[in-house]
Amino acid sequence: MKGWLLHHRQAAEQALRRLAATPLNTVLGALVVGIALALPAGGEMLLANFQRLAQRIAATPQLSVFMALDAARKDATEIESRLRKHAQTREVRFVPREDTLKRLKASEGLGEVIESLPRNPFPDAFVVVPRDEAPAILEAMRAEFAKYPRVEHVQLDSAWVKKLDALLRLARLAVTFLAAVLGIALIAVTFNTIRLQILTQGAEIEVSRLLGATDAFIRRPFYYFGALQGLAGGLVAWGAVLVATLLLRGPVAELASLYGIEFALHILPLADSALLFGLAALLGWAGAWLSLSRHLRD
């Protein structure tokens, strides 16, 4: 075990020395990788902030449950009890048909029309506020409530929920696609860098083989080189996103205040930052593995 750890430490140190030996190439490589990673990382940051903003400004979806016109108050009481006991119900408000009639009578232009009606044409109704705003759950609640006895119609005010959900899913798909394309570009950059390293150190590799070095021993420093280059690019991307977030925070907060909204951009959370570094190192390692498999066969 100690020997295995020693070999990996030596390989990592050798990779660091190679990076330090060509500082200009190292910096340029990190910048190229960092720019490629900064775009999807910045997109993820903006998407997360947009989701937070959408949750704050969007109205809570509601379900309107209308009773049958000939339903008695006892029927309404029973339905109210079932609605309040439902696991997905957060709040229930009863709207008596008499209150609806009074409000419309007080409305300008409708009072005379309502007065001319022979009887109250409005049913008792309930306004239900759900606990979960997921479109699938809202639709399931609507279908269930519509089956209750003496319930005539259930209206789901969720058009904005579906539009917002579709927009967020589209944005998430775009960020994922961008990350995949630029991830392939990162692998290609590392692939070419490792290829040049192999060509430059061809004589050293041949001597190592003559001395009995295994393929794993020869390949290990290149793996670390690719992973460290990817990690350096990840640090550049993280720094770029951090600077952009801090620069945009003031203007975004000022713009939001013009619409009466208190909002500030948040930086990438710790979990997303760790994921960025991990993926950057992994993609660098993958590029090194592909290059070694292609150019170090013999």
Image: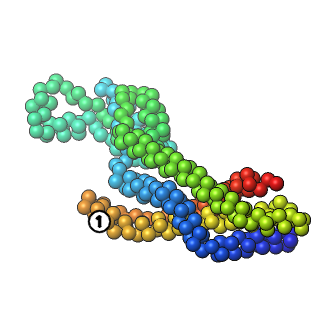
> In which quarter of the view is residue 13 placed?
bottom right
Quarter of the image with the N terminus in it: bottom right
Q: Secondary structure at mark 1?
A: helix
Residue 53 visible in the current orientation:
yes
Residue plotted at (56% across, 49% down): 180
The amino acid sitting under disc 1 is Glu
Q: Is residue 166 above or below residue 23?
A: above
Quarter of the image with the C terminus in it: bottom right
Residue plotted at (43% across, 34% down): 142
In this rendered view, identify the residue nearer to me: 19 or 39.
Answer: 19
Q: In this image, 276 relative to 245: left or right? A: right
Q: Is residue 134 above or below residue 115?
A: below
**Position in image of residue 177 (x %, y %):** 52, 47
Chosen colour scheme: rainbow
Residue 273 visible in the current orientation:
no
Q: In this image, 84 relative to 212: left or right? A: left
- Residue bearing mark 1: 254
**Position in image of residue 124 (x %, y %):** 30, 34
Q: In this image, 182 relative to 296: left or right? A: left
> In which quarter of the view is residue 287 placed?
bottom right
